[in-house]
Every structure is written in C-alpha cells, then in structure tokens.
Image (cartoon, helix red, strand yellow):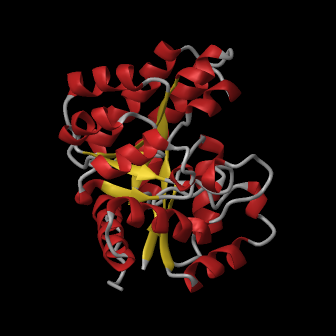
Amino acid sequence: MWFDSHCHLDFASFDGDRAAVWDRAQRLGVDGAFVPGVSPAQWRRVARQLAGLPGLCWGVGLHPYHLEESTPAHWRQALDSLPQCYRQLGACAVGECGLDARLAKRGGPDLEVQVGVLEAHLDIARLLGAPIVVHVVGAHGRMLQLLERRGPLPAGGILHSYSGSAELVPRYARLGFSFGFGGAVVSDRARRARDSVRRVEPQQLLLETDAPDQPIGGGGPGRRNEPAALLQVAETVASLRNIPLDALAESTRANALRLFGVGMAAA
C-alpha cells in the first residue's frame, strides 16, 4: 500500500468528485495521504471536507503564496491561533510553510518577511512536538542557514517536492528532514531531482503527487493530477533506486506513518 505525502485533496478542482477521486486512489493501493494546511480560512474547511474519507490526515500552516492575501496583522493573529487549531482539528503536522524566492522576485512577500513567518512555524512545531512540512523554491541556502542555526526539531520535518541538489541532501538529513518527490521525477529531463532521489537514505524517502496542480512528468498545466498518479511516481523512483516496487511501497509508507503518527493498520 502507498502513502501520498503531499496532496491538496481539499482544492476546489476536487469539489465535484472528491470521494470518487479518493476511492480511485484506494483501489490502486494508495490508502493514505497528507493534506497540507495553507491558510487560516482553509484549516477548518479541510478538517470538515476530509473527515469522512478514510486514511487522510492534514496540517495547519501559512503557505508563502497565501501571505499575499492578507496583512501582517492577520498573519500574526493566525500564527497565534495555530497551536490551538492544530489540537482542535486533530492535525498531524505544521505546514505547509516555507521560503519561495521566485515569489519574492515577482513582487510577493520579501524573503526576509517569509523567514519571519517560517521561524514562527518552527517555534510552533517545536512547542507541539509536531513535524513541519516546508516548501522551498530558490532559497535552499537561506533555508539551510536558518535550520542549521536553530538545530533539529524533535519530530523532524519534510522537504515537500524537494528541489535542492543531491549535494545538499546530507545537510538536510542531519537536521532530521525527510524528502518528498513527486511528478517531476517522471521526466527523464529532471536530472537534478533524479540525482537527489538516488542520494536520499531509505528511511528519509517519501512519495507525493502534490495534486491537483503539479503535473506528472513536468508537462504543461491544464490536466488535473490526483493521488492515483502516485503509482507513476513510484515506478520511476523504484527504477532509479533499483529496488522492487513492493519494497518501496513498504518503506515509504512506513516513513510517512512514522512522521505523521497516523494510526493506520499495516498493509
């Protein structure tokens, strides 16, 4: 059985067939998934939308993209309420949060503003003893500088859709981070991601779809991705690591359950 470690199953593109999408994934062996929290308005909606679907867990966090939608006063209020919401909603991780230099360059929140918000998430994850799920685009140097200064978190963390080089993998690993790989690795042009897939230790490897928006194989936008596509990612990763599919399923699912603390029966 498989675990999709990053899937936005709450997004509006699934509103018409969410249960059918998850049923389709389950029939292909994807029996668990983590749904990130991205904004305060979404936190309670996620818990409500997904409560009836088996095998799902969710997070609470402020994604860098959603900092554009409100003011610093609203961010602070949301961050103040985040620990209570985490407990009330039965969340399993803090995040998705992080640093996105590309967003800053096109006029979004300045990178140092994003750093301040990320540091608050790190403090909350430490307080709660929860794993943190981070988004890093074009800012691995700044992220590592911050994480190495602060030291490992008690429950570790996940680098969602890892975009750093293979050379950075050991530095993140020493800080207790696991690495999520998604649809990009399916493309044979994704040499950087494929090199990283080979470098990650088995106990720190996760698979994801980042559905619905991240295309499988790096194709153009427009076609909705969904958790059932995790099998395409898995086949590529198994080939890159030269291991059987069933061994990859067992190890990556165990890694996800350990990080998220999800009480699911063994396959």
177 or 199, nearer to the observer: 199
| Left or right of 32 on screen, residue 104 | right
238 or 38, nearer to the observer: 238
Quadrant of the rendered image containing residue 252: bottom left
Image spot of residue 39 (x, y percent): 60, 41
Image spot of residue 77 (x, y percent): 53, 30
Q: Is residue 189 visible in this depiction of the protein?
A: yes
Image spot of residue 257 (x, y percent): 33, 67
Residue at 25 percent of width and 59 percent of height: 202
Image quarter where the C terminus lies is bottom left
84 or 195, nearer to the observer: 195
Image quarter where the N terminus lies is bottom left
Residue at 76 percent of width and 56 percent of height: 12
Vertical position of residue 148 compared to residue 94: above or below: above
Q: Is residue 162 visible in this depiction of the protein?
A: no
Residue at 52 percent of width and 44 percent of height: 190
How many numbered marks have been drawn onto this rendered protein structure?
0
| Left or right of 33 on screen, residue 38 | right
Vertical position of residue 214 compared to residue 76: above or below: below
Image spot of residue 52 (x, y percent): 60, 77
Vertical position of residue 150 compared to residue 237: above or below: above
Vertical position of residue 54 compared to residue 86: above or below: below
Residue at 55 percent of width and 56 percent of height: 186
Quadrant of the rendered image containing residue 227: bottom right
